[in-house]
């Protein structure tokens, strides 16, 4: 944080060194020489976007072929929102996903008496034939949800259609739950619109088709939802030889971004036939943790990315992660990942090149404390055995942490902690835990320290195969309280950890022996 006005007393202090910008708060604390807890607070987010006022809900990404950039529409959450008219559609643009330019409000809400008194998720597509952008979105009231449309010639001024109006009751579907239209062009040259709804009590995705984006024909059920689940924010795309459905599971016990795959649309539809559950892998197609929701994708023709929102926590409580009754708040920061397609068609999420390139300045690395036993240092390598840790110097506001962990066996257990000082009553740890006899791993979240609760229920990760060489290449990006962890381009774990910035951090072992090397901290 840069401050424009310094007090005379503060200006008279002798600088004791700083590991970030010339911030007088940091300077007066002997930043390099202390490892005590510092009560840091969120400042302006510069990587994981948050509007100046309010928060990001349900991103609707779109690659603009005219301006050749990404436009991300989203539901603007003001907190507090007006009682009856809320969540207008705002937007941002970006070329590299590392910085965003606000487009302001694009599609306003209607009046309290109109069908779009509140707005819900939708999607945007460009029609080359008439040179218009089409955004299909949800109109929401307490009594019903309907699908509506707005068009624009310049992506600035949008005109709501007075004639386009789809409601579920006209086709035998739910009146109240009929939302989240997603439009894509199929191999048949037709436009397809997928809508999340209910048929009776059964969740279904229904389909409409069109040749011109104006007139739409009902095509029936595209896919039934398994069991008692409800798939929000559907997104369908083709990547290579595979079709994918990415969706967000509304059910409180899950509430994750997931996916199905198929070589054809018919094969994709069949993934849930008769509640069969043809998952693309052994983790129900999970793509991230519960701190990444409403994920939807867009491609520039070279890479496909997915954007979702990382929720804030009521009262800045790091343990309010999703397990009842500690639900996170709705909306938060905009987080993006690169989609990685593997040979078998399965997907994982990796880091974004534009974000990685931001962290250009290397921060000096200094060991501030370590466990009395179990730590050996040799040529910038740290060997940790049993219950051991090494504590490093304070982080900046925005950080890139990278290191390699070489485990001695598949059952070794290790992790990394934040908000950790030598006097911390609580600190927060992401644990790489062995599962299924060590054949798999899973990321868990813990609140440690003498006042910590231990395992935090509700935000544990998904199973992933233990690397054959027992080597984990870890990269962590932080922007204030948003923390995104990547391991081996195979695992992503988004979380929000208040107090992370400007505090020390550690790498820990719990069981077995791990060698930690190539530890780097960069910032901007």
Image (cartoon, helix red, strand yellow):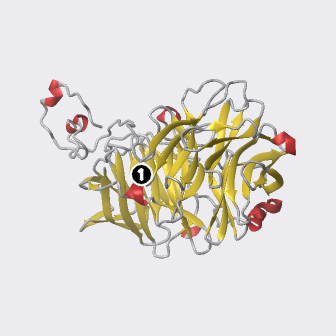
Residue found at x 33% / y 54%: 359
Circle 1 Cα neighbour tier, 10 Å, few/some/many (<14 / 14–19 / ≥20): some
- How far across and how far down the image is residue 314, in percent? 53, 33
Between 431 and 465, the one lying in front of the other is 465
* Residue pointed to by mark 1: 98
Between 509 and 219, the one lying in front of the other is 219
Q: Which quadrant would the N terminus be assigned to in this image? A: top left
Between 383 and 153, the one lying in front of the other is 153
Between 328 and 162, the one lying in front of the other is 162
Please give left or right for residue 107 compared with residue 161 in the image: left
Does 51 sit above or below residue 95? above
Residue found at x 30% / y 56%: 360
- How far across and how far down the image is residue 492, in percent? 51, 58
Examine the rendering and report whether any part of residue 313 can be seen.
Answer: no
Examine the rendering and report whether any part of residue 409 can be seen.
Answer: yes
Please give left or right for residue 422 compared with residue 255 in the image: left
Element at label 1 = loop
Does 327 sit above or below residue 112? below
- How far across and how far down the image is residue 135, in percent? 64, 45
> Which quarter of the figure has residue 278?
bottom right
Please give left or right for residue 205 compared with residue 281 in the image: right
Badge count: 1
- How far across and how far down the image is residue 266, in percent? 77, 66
């Amino acid at each position: 944080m840069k401050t424009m006005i310094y007090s005379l007393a503060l200006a008279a202090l002798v600088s004791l060194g700083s590991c970030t910008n010339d911030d007088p708060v940091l300077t007066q604390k002997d930043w390099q020489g202390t490892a005590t807890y510092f009560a840091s607070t969120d400042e302006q987010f510069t990587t994981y976007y948050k509007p100046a006022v309010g928060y990001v809900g349900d991103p609707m990404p779109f690659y603009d072929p005219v301006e050749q950039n990404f436009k991300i529409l989203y539901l603007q959450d003001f907190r507090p929102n007006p009682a009856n008219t809320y969540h207008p559609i705002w937007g941002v643009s970006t070329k590299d996903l590392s910085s965003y330019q606000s487009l302001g409000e694009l599609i306003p809400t209607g009046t309290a008496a109109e069908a779009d008194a509140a707005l819900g998720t939708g999607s945007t597509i460009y029609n080359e034939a008439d040179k218009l952008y089409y955004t299909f979105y949800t109109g929401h009231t307490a009594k019903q949800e309907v699908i509506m449309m707005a068009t624009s010639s310049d992506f600035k001024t949008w005109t709501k259609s007075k004639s386009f109006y789809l409601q579920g009751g006209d086709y035998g579907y739910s009146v109240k739950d009929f939302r989240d239209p997603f439009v894509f062009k199929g191999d048949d040259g037709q436009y397809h619109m997928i809508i999340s709804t209910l048929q009776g009590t059964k969740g279904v995705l229904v389909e409409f088709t069109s040749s011109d984006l104006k007139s739409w024909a009902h095509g029936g059920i595209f896919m039934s939802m398994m069991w008692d689940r409800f798939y929000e924010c559907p997104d369908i795309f083709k990547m290579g030889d595979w079709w994918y459905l990415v969706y967000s599971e509304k059910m409180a016990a899950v509430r994750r971004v997931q996916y199905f795959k198929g070589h054809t649309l018919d094969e994709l539809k069949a993934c849930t036939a008769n509640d069969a559950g043809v998952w693309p892998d052994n983790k129900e197609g999970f793509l991230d943790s519960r701190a990444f929701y409403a994920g939807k994708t867009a491609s520039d023709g070279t890479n496909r990315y997915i954007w979702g929102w990382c929720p804030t926590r009521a009262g800045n409580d790091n343990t309010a992660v999703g397990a009842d009754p500690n639900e996170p708040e709705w909306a938060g920061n905009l987080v993006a990942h690169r989609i990685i397609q593997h040979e078998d068609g399965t997907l994982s999420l990796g880091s974004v090149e534009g974000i990685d390139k931001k962290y250009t300045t290397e921060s000096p690395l200094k060991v501030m404390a370590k466990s009395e036993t179990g730590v050996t240092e040799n040529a910038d390598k740290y060997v940790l055995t049993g219950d051991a840790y090494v504590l490093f110097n304070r982080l900046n506001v925005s950080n890139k942490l990278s290191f390699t962990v070489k485990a001695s066996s598949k059952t070794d257990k290790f992790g990394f902690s934040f908000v950790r000082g030598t006097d911390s009553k609580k600190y927060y740890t992401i644990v790489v835990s062995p599962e299924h006899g060590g054949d798999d791993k899973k990321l868990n979240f813990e609140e440690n320290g003498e006042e910590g609760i231990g395992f935090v229920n509700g935000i544990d990760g998904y199973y992933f195969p233990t690397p054959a060489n027992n080597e984990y290449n870890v990269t962590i990006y932080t922007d204030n309280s948003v923390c995104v962890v990547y391991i081996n381009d195979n695992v992503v774990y988004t979380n929000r950890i208040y107090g992370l910035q400007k505090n020390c951090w550690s790498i820990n072992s719990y069981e077995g022996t791990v060698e930690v090397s190539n530890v780097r901290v960069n910032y901007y």
